[in-house]
Amino acid sequence: MDIDLLVRGTALVAVLSTAVVYGTDVFCAVVLRPALAAVDDDALVAVMGHVHRYGDKRMPVPGALGILAAAAATVLAAMAGHWAQTIAAGVALVLLIIWIGLYTQVSAPINRELTEAAHVGRSLPNGRALQDKWDGIIGVRALLQGLAVVALCVALAL
């Protein structure tokens, strides 16, 4: 198989996988965040706890696939000597690594706390504060994912 086809194929997989996470983060920033401001604290904990229960089980697949495909596209482009593609895919990979750092250090611990409270039907006195902290980085997360999609599209187009 031609290495150029492999580079483009892995970049395409990276774009599509990353776009799933990007779309989810944008939805959360644009729709979910303001909608949650209109519900009471117990409803917020129940809804977001259950959202994270499903999201944290299902979203790692496209997230990991996007990161792995971006890494593969970077390596394959470098092996082919396509330096512009290498740089574009590498930029996307760095952005996705920064995103995963924010997710694991800020969002995931909050997700677990909200999920546990919702699972057992427990009120969470700091639920609104936790959600505010989660909301505080969702815009940055969406921006990082969006820029990664753009960089991957550049790698695909070159």
Image (cartoon, grey):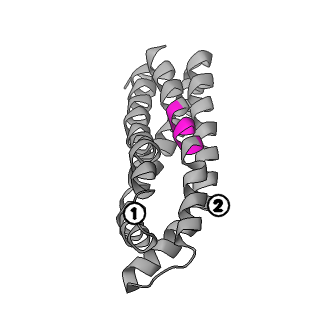
- Residue 141 falls within the magenta-colored stretch: yes
Residue 92 numbered tag:
none
- Residue 152 falls within the magenta-colored stretch: no
Q: Residue at x 50, y 44 (%)?
A: 68
Quadrant in the picture for the N terminus: top left
* x and y, in percent, of residue 94 in the image: 64, 38
Specify whether 109 is left or right of 122. Answer: right
Of circles 2 and 1, the one toward us is 1
Q: Residue at x 44, y 49 (%)?
A: 34
Specify whether 19 is left or right of 100. Answer: left
Question: Looking at the image, which is closer to me, 39 or 63?
Answer: 39
* x and y, in percent, of residue 153 in the image: 46, 23
Question: Looking at the image, which is closer to me, 25 or 136?
Answer: 136
In the displayed structure, would residue 155 be above or below residue 25? above
Cα separation, mark 2 vs mark 1, equals: 26 Å
- Residue 54 appears in the figure: yes
Is disc 2 surrounded by few (<14), some (14 to 19) or many (20+) residues within 10 Å?
A: few
- Which of the 4 quarters of the picture holds residue 126? bottom right
- Identified by mark 2, the residue type is Gln
Q: Residue at x 57, y 66 (%)?
A: 130
Highlighted range, magenta: 140-146
Pointer 2: what residue? 105
Question: Looking at the image, which is closer to me, 50 or 144?
Answer: 50
